[in-house]
């Protein structure tokens, strides 16, 4: 897991957009695949014939969107970062790790076009995995101040 960084776009750029995972070159922008997964720099994406979208650091970290989303839960003082890559998954444009005081959250952005039934299904799967008889450590959905 990556260490969350302060809620400051400049800090985020310096601490996490450092180098391309494919060539090690310093990144100014990132290329993501259609699922939002980090590919790397523009040159590596082009050389590997990856289909992707170029995002600036602001688009990658989306500090205003993260602050707005967390504000819906009354969370105003926090540190945020991208989850570290794993063997099964690369960092994604719409996932963040958040630490607010003693609480640790995983924020996933669902866009307006994403079906609400799919979001409910995902939350149901997570709840099922966390239930006895053998509860697994999975993120729990947190209702917004509106109850959603």
Image (cartoon, rainbow, N blue to C red):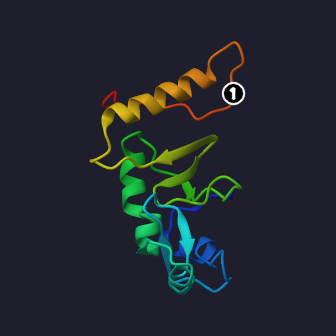
Residue 144 visible in this rendered orientation of the protein: no
Q: Residue, x 55% and y 45% (percent of image)?
A: 106
Q: Is residue 10 above or below residue 6?
A: below
- Residue 47, percent from left and from top: 55, 84
Is residue 46 shown left or right of residue 73? right
Q: Residue furthest front?
A: 49
Q: Is residue 119 above or below residue 7?
A: above
- Residue 79, percent from left and from top: 57, 56
Compare residues 11 and 89 and report the one nearer the observer.
Answer: 89
Is residue 148 shown left or right of residue 84? left
Query: On the rendered image, what quadrant is the C terminus found in?
Result: top left
- Residue 73, percent from left and from top: 41, 39
Identify residue for label 1.
136
Q: Secondary structure at mark 1?
A: loop
Compare residues 122 and 61 and report the one nearer the observer.
Answer: 122
Q: Residue, x 27% and y 47% (percent of image)?
A: 112
- Residue 69, percent from left and from top: 38, 48
Q: Residue furthest left?
A: 113
Q: Is residue 57 above or below residue 43?
A: above
Residue 82 visible in this rendered orientation of the protein: yes
């Amino acid at each position: 897991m990556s260490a969350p960084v302060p809620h400051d776009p400049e800090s985020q750029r310096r601490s996490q957009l450092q180098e391309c995972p494919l060539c090690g070159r310093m990144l100014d922008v990132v290329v993501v695949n259609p699922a939002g997964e980090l590919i790397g720099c523009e040159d590596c994406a082009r050389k590997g014939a990856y289909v992707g979208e170029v995002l600036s650091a602001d688009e990658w970290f989306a500090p205003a969107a993260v602050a707005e989303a967390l504000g819906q839960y009354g969370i105003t003082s926090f540190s945020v970062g991208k989850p570290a890559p794993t063997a099964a998954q690369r960092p994604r444009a719409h996932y963040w790790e958040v630490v607010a005081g003693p609480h640790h959250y995983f924020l996933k952005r669902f866009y307006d076009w994403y079906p609400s039934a799919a979001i409910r299904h995902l939350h149901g799967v997570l709840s099922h995995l966390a239930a006895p008889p053998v509860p697994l450590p999975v993120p729990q959905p947190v209702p917004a101040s509106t109850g959603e």
